[in-house]
Structure formats: C-alpha cells, structure tokens
Image (tube, rainbow, N blue to C red):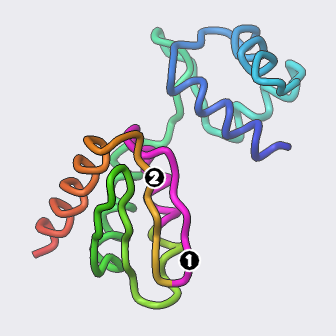
Amino acid sequence: MKAFRHGQILKIIQSRPIHTQEELARELASLGVAATQVTLSRDMRELGLVKTKEGYTQLAAPQERTAHVDLAVQEYLLDIRPAQNLLVLKTPAAYANSLAIAIDRATWPEIAGTIAGDDTVLVVCGDHAAAQAIHQRLLSILRGAE
C-alpha cells in the first residue's frame, strides 16, 4: 500500500497545487487512500517533497530524470514502431525493463504508462498526437547521441 500511496501523492502534487497536508489527505481520501498526518509527513520526507509558494513539489530535479532517460534511450533503444497511440520500442535482450523504468521515471505527461517484456517496451500514450510527440522526442534524444 505504501508504494501505491507514494505514487498517488506524486500524481496529485504534479496535477494541481497542494498547499497543506490536510489538502493532500483529502485528495488521497477521495481516491480511497487513507493516511494519517504522521504517515503523510513520513511519506513526504521519503519522497523528497518540499513546500513552495506554488505548493508541494519534489526536490529531484527534472534534469536528473531527463539525463537518466536520455542515457537509457541512447544505450538500449534499437527501433521504434508507432501504432496509433502506442509505441513499440525494441531493445537488446534483457534491457526492455531498464528502458521502461527510465521512461516511467521521466514522468512525461504524454505517456500513460509502459509495459516491458524481455526485448520490447510498449509505451501507451493518451492519443495519436501524444505518441507522435514521444516518437519525435525519442528520435531527438538519439540524434543528440551522434
């Protein structure tokens, strides 16, 4: 339950401004996730959340997440096959999970999620336009490695 709660906390603070723990607790409760103030304090510390004028945000710099996904794409991506709102990414055997994790951690808003096999990552986007945007972003990352 802790991992799910952490995921929901991050999803909430990334989608709208949250200024108090009480607001966060209400948002979590609306999703069916109960959390005491003590639990929220611990979760927020573990997630590296800080309070700003705009609301809570995560300390981890977006550049760090971007650098990680850039390295994974440059290292593991062999092919991209678009299919409507999906992208099928090919990797060497045993590297699909590493690429999928890097993409998930990048928290690109166009991506709903990924599914990894042994040498294939399925990237699920919200629509065809989002899939095209991610396709172009991946190609741009690859071009940057040249």
Q: Is residue 129 left or right of residue 55?
A: left
Which of the labelled discs sits on residue 17, or is there none? Answer: none
Residue 22's image quarter?
top right
Residue located beneath label 1 in the image: 117
Which of the labelled discs sits on residue 124, or is there none? Answer: 2
Q: Residue at x 50, y 54 (%)?
A: 104
Q: Quadrant of the C terminus?
A: bottom left
Residue furthest bottom in the image:
93
Between 132 and 69, which is closer to the camera in this rendering? 132
Asked if residue 46 is positioned above or below residue 36 in the image, the reply reads below
Between 58 and 77, which is closer to the camera in this rendering? 77
Do tag 2 and tag 1 residues touch (Cβ < 8 Å)?
A: no
What amino acid type should be assigned to the residue bearing mark 1?
Gly
Q: Residue at x 71, y 39 (%)?
A: 6
What amino acid type should be assigned to the residue bearing mark 2?
Val
| Circle 2 residues within 10 Å: few <14, some 14–19, many ≥20 | many
Asked if residue 77 is positioned above or below residue 6 in the image, the reply reads below
Q: Quadrant of the N terminus?
A: top right
| Circle 1 residues within 10 Å: few <14, some 14–19, many ≥20 | some
Q: Residue at x 16, y 72 (%)?
A: 145
Between 116 and 3, which is closer to the camera in this rendering? 116
Q: Is residue 32 left or right of residue 63?
A: right
Magenta-colored span:
100-118
- Residue 116 spot, x, y in % from top left: 54, 70
Residue 43's image quarter?
top right
Between 82 and 23, which is closer to the camera in this rendering? 82
Disc 1 on helix, strand or loop?
loop
- Residue 11 spot, x, y in % from top left: 58, 31
